[in-house]
Amino acid sequence: MKFNEKEILSACGADVLKSLGCDDRFGISTDTRTIKEGEIYLPLKGETFDGEKFISQALEKGAIGYFTTTGEIFEDAKVIFKVENTLVAYLSIARYCRRKINPITVAITGSSGKTTTKEMVYSVLSEKFKTHKTFSNHNNEVGLCQTILGMPDDTQALILEMGMRGFGEIELLSKYSEPDYAIITNAGSAHIGRLGSLDNIAKAKSEIVTKLNTNGALIANDNDRLKKFVTFSGEKIWYSIDQVKVLEQRRGYSKFLYKGKEIELNVEGNYNIENSLSAIELGYKLGMNTDEIKCGLLKYHPIEKRWEEQKISGYTLINDSYNANPESMKASVSTFIDLYEKPVVVLGNMGELGEKEEELHRAVGITLAKTAKKETKFLTVGILAEKIGEELSRSGFFVKNFDNNKAVSDYIIDYIDVGCTIFLKASRSMKFEEILEYLKGRK
């Protein structure tokens, strides 16, 4: 979206240091690497960078003007706005855009499953509405602004994924996006290292209702902690896998009954079924019929590194290493083991679990030991993942631990039979995509 000077002033209350005094409209860019001629440069700041140091570069590349917190004047700029905080200015301009286009706005957060849920919601709503969504997992303050400012003027439904590192962040995103509907996928142990307890995680996720339209609805996982901390006077819809009757599950397919309606997905796993329930509920709230909702869900397919299947060097590899926390690891590994014969599972460290990281890794091992088939082979990578393996080994499972991705890849090539299906699960920091590359390079 482009703005004239009056709209920028109205949006963020800037002081005008230099003006064209006309109604010309300008795009806004925060990146000198991609800035286009005629755009206004909005320099962001962080702990390790200061975008204001690159104002001259932005002008050299054709920027017509810039925002500043210092009041520094570059003579070749035609438009200059002074603000106290450039991120707040960016958020304020995004909120102005959201209000002007005024789409149905859906905010989604959760300890796990939020990106999958966002994609499912997008697939459903796209059957009826011109829909725009957060790209990939660009779910922080900057990503929120980029998503809102990037939506076409005819957008009817806006889907915003909201990530969290600590208290106050979801509240900030809610404040500047003013959602009509909010979805909380769950409140598990992801980021417990930052927030200290499961109660604190639930409190932080519940911030999504801060500016939630009371004429809309909160759609949330049926979780006692969320029920304890959500303060929202409007409609609340609670969903759970316990409300579902699974009719059929196989590789790449699920069929289930939910509230008397038969639904199909082109993915497996109870956790995927549960994620889809929020999309179903939202579809009904927005006046969609069952056929539209069913058709939308059938068009959903996992995005990269989420249950991504590849044939490499005679193996079938399922890469689910986009992210990992105890809940998602238990759910996805259990699903894989149920669906495949002679399964091989490669597990890596889970990050951001704080002081209880060893305990939480061991808990994954204890859970999997109760549910896994005895013929399952477990390969673990890293010091923390080794704790998962120790619990599995105590229960008689085949387990080997490795220090790095090269070592586990060499073992697979030397000792795992070609034709096997191998499942990869770890936090992104483990870089499990390296395993795929090592296997591609086998002779």
Image: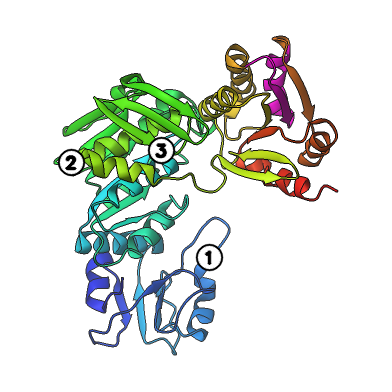
Query: In x, y percent, where is residue 27?
Result: 36, 75
Q: Which mark is residue 104?
A: none
Q: Secondary structure at mark 3?
A: loop
Q: Nearer the viewer, residue 225 or 316?
A: 316
* Depth order, front residue of 254/437: 254
Is residue 196 among what the camera can see?
yes
Outermost residue on the left side: it is: 215
Q: Is residue 384 magenta?
A: yes
Amino acid type at circle 1 is Asp
Residue 167, numbered label? 3
Indicate the amino acid at tag 2.
Gly
**Sequence-wise, which precedes: disc 2 or disc 3?**
3
Q: Is residue 243 above or below residue 72?
A: above
3 and 1 marks in contact (CB < 8 Å) = no
Please name whichever residue, 209 or 422, is drawn nearer the observer in this view of the structure. 422
Residue named by callout 1 = 50
- Range shown magenta: 373-393
Which quadrant: the N terminus? Answer: bottom left
Residue 186 visible: no
Q: Which amino acid is tagged 3?
A: Phe
- How is the rendered protein coloured? rainbow
Mark 3 closeness class: few <14, some 14–19, many ≥20 residues within 10 Å: some
**Badge 2 element:** loop
Picture coordinates of residue 113 (x, y %)?
44, 36
Residue at mark 2 to residue at mark 3: CA–CA distance: 24 Å
Q: Which residue is mark 2?
A: 216
Where is residue 34? Give x, y as percent. Answer: 51, 74
